[in-house]
Amino acid sequence: LSGDLADRILGGDLRAAARLMRDLDDGAPAAVETLKRLYPHTGKAQVVGVTGNPGAGKSTLVSALIRLLRGRGERVGVVAVDPTSPFSGGAILGDRVRMQEHATDPGVFIRSLATRGHLGGLSRSTSDVVSVLDAMGYGKILVETVGVGQDEVEIARSAHTTVVIMVPGLGDEVQTIKAGLLEVADVFAVNKADRPGADRVVSDLEMLVHGGRVGSWSVPVVRTVAVSGEGVEALWKEIERHLAAAESGEGGEVRRRHRAEQRLLEILRDELGALVDASLRSTGRLAEMAAALADRRSDPYTLAEQAMRTLLGG
Amino acid sequence: LSGDLADRILGGDLRAAARLMRDLDDGAPAAVETLKRLYPHTGKAQVVGVTGNPGAGKSTLVSALIRLLRGRGERVGVVAVDPTSPFSGGAILGDRVRMQEHATDPGVFIRSLATRGHLGGLSRSTSDVVSVLDAMGYGKILVETVGVGQDEVEIARSAHTTVVIMVPGLGDEVQTIKAGLLEVADVFAVNKADRPGADRVVSDLEMLVHGGRVGSWSVPVVRTVAVSGEGVEALWKEIERHLAAAESGEGGEVRRRHRAEQRLLEILRDELGALVDASLRSTGRLAEMAAALADRRSDPYTLAEQAMRTLLGG
């Protein structure tokens, strides 16, 4: 059965792919079996992470990149990871419209992820969806994230190349970025570069870049105006240049191993967490421990140590 | 030794407390022993989560709350969880200045958390710091988070009362909030309420509140101007009203048990994750699996299942 579904997905059945992604989110055990069958067909796609604050123009830039890549005959997969929801109706409509342009293009597959799946965190869900798209032969996969939570930084880090978008005019208070995000940036895009203050952002970033990272790759700063498509070709050129530099030779080997390790550890952490949760609940042990804790008869660390010993049979 | 340190902390030694917090972050094993000794002295503080987007005025509002509470003779602990870093120098200076006001007040203890500690995630570090402050007799503890990542939502959820700050004028695109954050809001503060657009934000929130949550607590919407202190007393009144309503009776019992369960599971997940990581690395198994994965000789789920069986001795 999972073999059937896998064959249909490999044959390009979009409905089957969408169903698998839904089943993965719902924690259907058969879904993981299907994913296992798809896995040997993965590893061919180029994965690009695009991250930045709300209002930086991520969706518009991703849309412009899709347009560029489609013009070159590439098939493009998009994973839009956005756990934020707009407070008023304005933004959601805008976002949908920006992506809608590609909704009817069979060469583009867009999947939005907003919440943790049943099987684990957003990072794991994203990796699963990327694997499905990769197996289906989407050669370019864009992973769009809001660059603010720790989860999102991990997601950005798992791509071959990470583009961090900055914009002028959001004001100092708003223009904060996740600590550690500067470190994961392989390419900076200064979007809305036709706005006042763009020169300042570019020069600030260039100073950061020159002061900062050790290593052979010097992080380029590219100006873009995503709505008009200006600078998007130059941006893609830098992404390709980074891929060639980072993923080749011995360094590329190290990066591949590291990504594989991270993915394994992530799945293991999720599985163990789910196992512990289920086992402590079903035995009533969790409720007992919580009662002891609420009454201050014990402390969380002593209780956790005891539970660990029981779980690991030690 | 850990008993000595615990006694000094319980006796009000601020240096000893700061050292323990640092040791907890560094993963010093003795630190957990000290925490165990402090735990019986916890459970007295009122913990309030304050969360909102960058630019919403969180630090200013927290500072205004500190002023109000100090005026009433309360001792106040603050945990400022901010994994974002300002892009330019402006914001960082502003933030420091806003909090600086209370830096020399012995009745106020401020601890900033920016990165995951060695022992685990930000959520666990925050709970640990809250426990230390609680044991030291800080009766009011304010936990300030940027309300955007999943981590931060979990942190906000672990307080007795969660205040979500919204502001007018950030624009629809920027004014997005974490999905699920509306659900954890116990009180809304519309800050910078003297700015144009405040009425719109208030009425939007009131509509959301009335349309939304089932249950006995109707989420109030309070206007504040944190820089002048306007509305801050009214805000605290609503926080107290929520505490009285939510933490009393049977519902309060359920909430205490739930928080205890979450804290235990969080520690267990962290400990198991660290154990798995260390065990797979030290045996060379992780590198073997990563190589098999990189060459597509196996898939991450099959490898994770095998590793789980080995780890659990099954």
Image: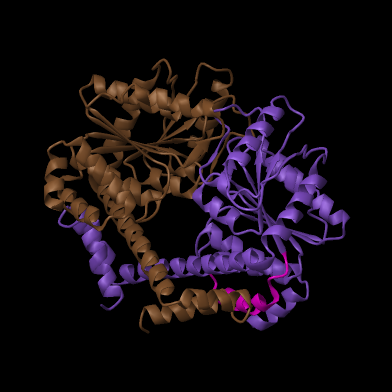
Chain colours: A brown, B purple
Q: Magenta span has B39?
A: yes
Q: Which residues are magenta?
A: B27-45
Q: Is residue A308 left or right of residue B107?
A: left
Q: Quick check: A285 left or right of A120? A: right
Q: Position of residue A226 (x, y in %)?
A: 42, 21
In-front residue for pair A36/B33? A36
Q: Can the viewer see residue A206?
A: yes
Compared across the picture, whether B13 is left or right of B171 comes to: right
Q: Main secondary structure of the magenta part?
A: helix
How far across and down, in percent of the image, does residue A167 sit?
A: 52, 27
Q: Is residue A282 magenta?
A: no
State the residue in front, B101 or A211.
Answer: B101
- Which picture quadrant has residue B135? bottom right
Query: Percent position (x, y) of residue B27?
Result: 53, 69
* Image quadrant where one finds the C terminus of chain A: bottom left
Q: Quadrant of residue A290?
A: bottom right
Residue B302, above or below A308: above
Q: Nearer the viewer, residue B57 or B89?
A: B57
Residue at image location 31% in from the left, 47% down from the top? A127
- Residue A34 pos. (x, y %): 19, 51
Residue at horizontal 37 percent and vertical 55 percent from the top: A120
Label count reads: 0
